[in-house]
Image (cartoon, rainbow, N blue to C red):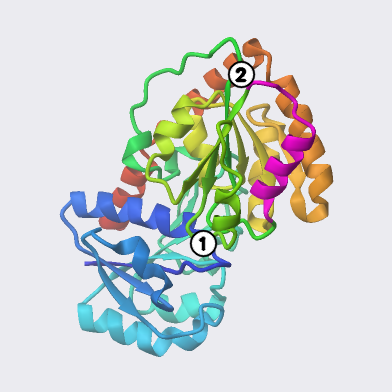
């Protein structure tokens, strides 16, 4: 059995649990069982009917070291020797103690490099930092982005001449109300007259009902949808917060405009922009109006089908969707 240590709440985006579940699915397909371990029961709705076990620590998700006694007791009880950790709240002492009992695989987007205690370090960002000094096995770049099966093996996308459908997503919670601000701004200052919007509202968005009231013939609202690949595939353009969705858009070949609203999103958004794959509109925390100005400018530029087609080719050559299989294999083999 392999343990997966992850949390989800109105602060921790749902992308963390989503990618852990994708890896768990691949681990189980390879013949191993999975046990999820979480601080509290906020994770439960995400694990329903997934075929995994769950243990709740009843701990503060921000205080990782305080959970160690109960976590180690669980690992011993289940006879677990390998654990995948997905948390930005880890400390060097946490990993030091944990590594004495299990082999650790860690999502390392913040560049901690596992503090020298991890067997595998995952950083699927488009431009990961230099891991030359890392003592662990570094699983780096878009080849190790763990996308769901629906994003694997997609055909080459054909670019429509006209821009008819724009998908907008803000991740699980949208704490700064980007979706509502965008839609209200568009109503006042539309860039195009006959475009439709597919608006993806996360499960933890506190403004779900407010956004539903904005729905009309032009705007379709999807709350916690299970049709993301279909919606992304059918869209001509996407406006996306930094995170896993950027790589899902790449697999679909759907040109995107990115924006940030959390520190861990910024570097990858800037890297996509720097490599001319997705333009970056800025951090909404520095000013929503300024970010929206940039988004609207980029939408105007991307009405050009030739520009969108060029981006599509770059995106689909970058991501093949098989990252979860590669990660699962590395965890099981203990590479």
Q: 74 or 260, which lies in front?
A: 260
The picture places residue 108, in percent across and down from the top left corner, at 53, 58
Q: Does the magenta stretch include residue 110?
A: no
CA distance separating discs 1 and 2: 30 Å
Give the extent of the magenta segment.
177-194
Question: Looking at the image, which residue sits at the far left?
Answer: 31
Q: Determine whether 182 is above or below 299 in the image.
A: below
The picture places residue 173, in percent across and down from the top left corner, at 57, 59
Q: Is mark 2 on a helix, strand or loop?
A: loop
Residue drawn at x 56%, y 78% as measured from the top left: 62
Q: 116 or 45, which lies in front?
A: 45
The picture places residue 97, in percent across and down from the top left corner, at 44, 82
Q: Say if residue 22 shows up in the picture.
A: yes
Q: 59 or 158, which lies in front?
A: 158
Q: Is residue 182 magenta?
A: yes
Which residue position holds label 2? 163
The reply, left or right, for residue 111 in relation to residue 302 is: left
Residue drawn at x 38%, y 35% as measured from the top left: 151
Which SS does the magenta portion mostly show?
A: helix
Q: 204 or 25, which lies in front?
A: 204
Residue drawn at x 25%, y 54% as measured from the top left: 27
Residue drawn at x 62%, y 46% as measured from the top left: 241
Q: Determine whether 145 is above or below 94 in the image.
A: above
Q: Specify which label sits upstream in the sequence, 1 or 2.
A: 2
Which residue position holds label 1? 204
The reply, left or right, for residue 279 in relation to residue 9 is: right
Q: Would you identify the image quadrant in which residue 291 lies?
A: top right
């Amino acid at each position: 059995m392999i343990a997966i240590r992850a949390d989800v709440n109105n602060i921790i985006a749902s992308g963390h649990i989503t990618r852990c579940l994708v890896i768990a699915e691949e681990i189980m397909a390879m013949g191993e069982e999975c046990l999820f371990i979480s601080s509290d029961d906020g994770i439960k709705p995400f694990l329903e009917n997934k075929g995994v076990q769950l243990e709740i620590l009843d701990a503060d998700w921000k205080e990782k070291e305080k959970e160690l006694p109960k976590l180690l007791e669980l690992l011993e009880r289940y006879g677990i020797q390998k654990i995948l950790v997905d948390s930005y709240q880890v400390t060097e002492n946490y990993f030091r103690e944990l590594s004495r009992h299990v082999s650790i695989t860690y999502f390392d987007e913040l560049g901690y490099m596992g503090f020298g205690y991890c067997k595998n370090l995952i950083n699927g960002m488009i431009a990961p930092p230099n891991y030359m000094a890392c003592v662990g096995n570094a699983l780096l770049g878009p080849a190790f982005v763990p996308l769901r099966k629906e994003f694997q093996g997609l055909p080459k996308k054909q670019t429509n001449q006209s821009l008819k459908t724009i998908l907008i997503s803000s991740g699980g919670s949208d704490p700064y109300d980007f979706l509502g601000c965008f839609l209200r701004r568009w109503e006042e200052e539309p860039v195009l007259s006959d475009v439709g919007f597919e608006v993806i509202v996360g499960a933890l968005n506190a403004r779900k009902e407010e956004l539903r009231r904005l729905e009309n013939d032009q705007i379709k609202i999807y709350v916690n949808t299970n049709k993301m690949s279909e919606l992304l595939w059918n869209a001509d353009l996407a406006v996306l917060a930094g995170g896993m969705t950027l790589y899902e858009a790449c697999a679909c070949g759907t040109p995107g405009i990115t924006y940030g609203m959390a520190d861990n999103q910024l570097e990858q958004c800037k890297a996509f922009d720097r490599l001319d794959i997705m333009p970056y509109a800025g951090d909404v925390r520095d000013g929503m109006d300024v970010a929206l100005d940039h988004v609207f400018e980029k939408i105007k530029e991307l009405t050009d089908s030739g520009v969108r087609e060029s981006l599509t080719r770059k995106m689909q050559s970058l991501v093949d969707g098989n990252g979860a299989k590669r990660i699962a294999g590395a965890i099981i083999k203990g590479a």
